Amino acid sequence: MSHLLSKKRSLDGTTLTQHVTPQSANWRYVGFEAHQVKAGESVQIQTGTDEVCAVILSGKANASTKSEEWENIGDRMSVFDQKAPYSVYSPAQDEIRITALTDVEVAFCKAPGKGGFQARLITPEQCQYETRGVASNTRHVCNILFGNEPADSLLVCEVITPSGGWSSYPPHKHDTDAAPAETQLEETYYHKIDPPQGFAFQRVYTDDRSIDETMAVEDGDLVMVPEGYHPVGVPHGYQSYYLNVMAGPSRNWIFHNDPDHAWIIERDKQL
């Protein structure tokens, strides 16, 4: 199995299904946890030196930090409802507690924090929802903590790719600290599949092919992208969702398309 693929885990007595740290990923910035929380149960994390964005992927919950509380948040029962999520942002040296009112899936997206922003609720109305691409390259993007909302390091968005389609395509990368041409950002892809017994494919490769991995990803799996291009393809009959978390030396998303495939962008303008 590829070292870039983290399989979903389910351990008795814990809510944790994914756990990636900068140490386990052998990089510097991005951390990620996913939890399945039963109705009436709670999960709490300490932010430490990180800022954290807790995304309510599905279900309804109460949420709190050291200084704030929000009740009955969450407006979708599935990530495929095509509704933006509720999320909670917390700065470093704080905490986030999620108490499930229904069964809840929650993702904790982490990156180094400077304490520059206060804890707050990010509502669906604050997210930016858009459809990009044409034909089999159509995808639906929701910016959760991107240009729509400030943060120290974190960039968080989610993408739905329809059946038989492609996303993060044409292949692009963001692994070089060379703004304004390109920025360096580590990235995780947390995958969900509809129906859940399906799978999708993700390739991660560099120009020199020092990394060249193609992975079959299943519901609840996570792919780490330390560098290189990283397109996703979805088989007929299934649709895919992924939650992206990015962070790097600067909070700017400037990507570079694979020159071999950049021609597709100009072709698509004619469609």
Image: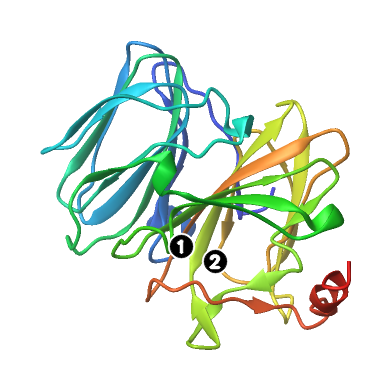
Name the residue type under label 2: Pro
The image shows residue 203 at horizontal and vertical percentages of 74, 59
Q: Who comes first in sequence, dot 1 or dot 2?
A: 1
* In this rendering, position of residue 215 left or right of residue 243: right
Query: Quadrant of the rendered structure where residue 114 is?
Result: bottom left
Q: Residue 269, image x and y in percent?
A: 82, 73
Residue drawn at 72 percent across, 30 percent down:
194
Q: Where is residue 42 drawn, in percent x and y?
A: 30, 21
Looking at the rendered structure, the kind of residue marked 1 is Asn
Q: What numbered label is drawn on residue 26?
A: 1
- Viewport quadrant of the C terminus: bottom right
Q: Are marks 1 and 2 in contact (CB under 8 Å)?
A: yes
Question: Which image quadrant is residue 15 in?
Answer: top left
Q: Is residue 113 above or below residue 54?
A: below
Label 1 neighbourhood size at 10 Å, few (<14), some (14-19), many (20+)?
few
Q: Helix, strand or loop at disc 1?
A: loop
Colour scheme in use: rainbow
Residue at the (43%, 40%) spot, across then down: 124
Residue that mark 2 sits on: 226
Residue at (77% x, 49% y) in the render: 201
- Tell me how far mark 1 sits from mark 2, CA to CA: 9 Å
The answer to whether 130 is drawn above or below residue 39 in the figure is below
The correct choice, above or below, for 229 with respect to 21 in the image is below
